[in-house]
Image (tube, helix red, strand yellow):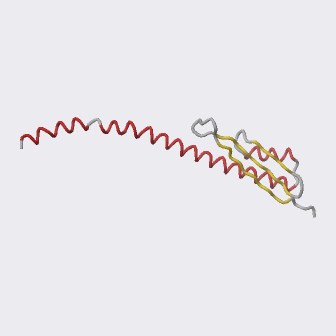
Amino acid sequence: MLGAWSVRPVLRARSAGMVTAELAVAIPAVVVVLAICLGGIALGIDQIRCVDAARLGARALARGDANPAVREVVTRAAPVAARISVNDGGSEARVTVTVHRSVLGLAHGFDVTATSVADREQDP
């Protein structure tokens, strides 16, 4: 019986650092996963802003607003550094908004694009 009691303190001393080692590996992994999730959420927000900006621009263009006015409306609603394409030819008004974003500082990054098309309003 005395031999069993003498082994337990040795086992506790050996396993005392295992939790620290596991946390040392787990915490950076959790931080990386969190950063990727936040980057994905940021891309989703940029996508929504691009869709809204393209929709507003297409509506303004379909109403007959001037090209500079349409660009101003789209620029206010679009994410920062967005590229705006306005095509007012034919019976359709088409606005495309594109923004380039990188996640976690990756060099390649992603292009977030939204296009909206509206039929031109006819004069009564």
Q: Residue 24 appears at what percent x and percent y?
A: 38, 36
Camera-side residue: 60 or 30?
30
Left or right? Give the position of 69 relative to 10.
right
Residue drawn where x is 70% and y is 40% of the image:
80
Residue occupying the far front of the picture = 108
Residue 75: image x %, image y %? 76, 43
Q: Position of residue 93 (x, y in %)?
A: 84, 54
Q: Residue furthest right?
A: 124
With 121 as the anchor, is 1 left or right in this view? left
Q: Residue furthest toward the left?
A: 1
Residue 17: quarter of image: top left
Residue at 62%, 35% (x, y): give it.
Answer: 107
Q: How many callouts does the rendering have?
A: 0
Left or right relative to 25: residue 82: right
Residue 61, placed above or below residue 122: above
Residue most extreme to the bottom:
124
104 above or below 124?
A: above
Quarter in which the C terminus is drawn: bottom right
Q: Residue at x 64, y 38 (%)?
A: 108
Q: Position of residue 96 (x, y in %)?
A: 77, 49
Q: Residue at x 49, y 43 (%)?
A: 33
Image quarter of the N terminus: top left
